[in-house]
Amino acid sequence: EVQLVESGGGLVQPGGSLRLSCAASGFTFSSYWMHWVRQAPGKGLVWVSRINSDGSSTSYADSVKGRFTISRDNAKNTLYLQMNSLRAEDTAVYYCARSSSGRYGWSDYWGQGTLVTVSS
Amino acid sequence: AIRMTQSPSSLSASTGDRVTITCRASQGISSYLAWYQQKPGKAPKLLIYAASTLQSGVPSRFSGSGSGTDFTLTISCLQSEDFATYYCQQYYSYVYTFGQGTKLEIK
């Protein structure tokens, strides 16, 4: 059974940093592209970032470019999102999602999400 | 970035109704479009990919169509469990944008 479990969320002050993790199981993690998607309270889904299967290629939404870094450790079956210079508008539930088939892949499995709150 | 615009933003309907949600891309995306359903407090669930292919396990009352810039999600006979928010997403570009969502409510 495919499972994605996010962790690392919490309360952080504006300007602070946080690293989210997404532990994957039930599939060959190293073969799949992965995404981070977020959802502010009461708002819609916003794509944040994606990484290819070996970690050599990444892309970001303009709103997080230069502040967030996506990475992965295929030996540990874990996806990461390093978030720096956090702002109040980064407050959201962050989901990791598996891309079904690489570059042109839809998100077929999602984690349950982890809440990040940026507030003083 | 490619902008995805859904309409309507909200929709009231009754059990048994047929409803259609539209998603328009700001530029052509071929058939690289997915539809997701989300219920409150839950992760999104994949319904349709490649604009019209039903994900395994999704009821056949859900269907999708379109290509290029205009797409639709149709639910042929609403069931109580279908009242949720629906999102389209393009995966044509490296910035995988979502529509703003359509909230389907009980009339």
Image (cartoon, coloured by chain):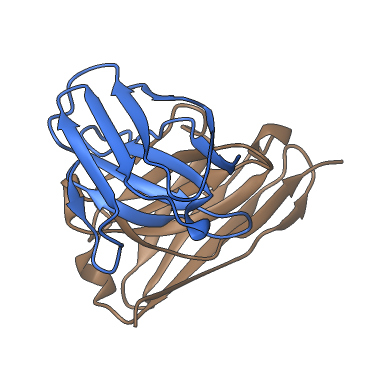
Task: Name the spot of residue B54 as percent of width and height, x first.
Answer: 21, 56
A101 or B46: nearer the viewer: B46
Residue B12 visible somewhere in the drawing = yes
- Above or below residue A39? Residue A88 is above
- Above or below residue B98? Residue A83 is below
B51 or B30: nearer the viewer: B51
Q: Quadrant of the C terminus of chain A?
A: top right
Q: Residue at x 17, y 45 (%)?
A: B50
Task: Name the spot of residue B8 as percent of width and height, x first.
Answer: 47, 25
In the figure, residue A67 lies in which quadrant? top right
Furthest-top residue in this view? B26
Q: Residue at x 46, y 55 (%)?
A: B44
A55 or A31: nearer the viewer: A31
Q: Which chain is blue?
A: B
Furthest-front residue in this view? B16
Task: Name the spot of residue B104 as percent of width and height, x first.
Answer: 53, 40
Left or right of B68 in this view: B86: right
Which tint was used for chain A? Answer: brown
In the figure, residue A54 lies in which quadrant? bottom left
- Above or below residue B1? Residue B72 is below
Task: Name the spot of residue B13 as percent of width and height, x first.
Answer: 52, 39
In the figure, residue B39 lies in which quadrant? bottom right
Q: Quadrant of the N terminus of chain A?
A: bottom left
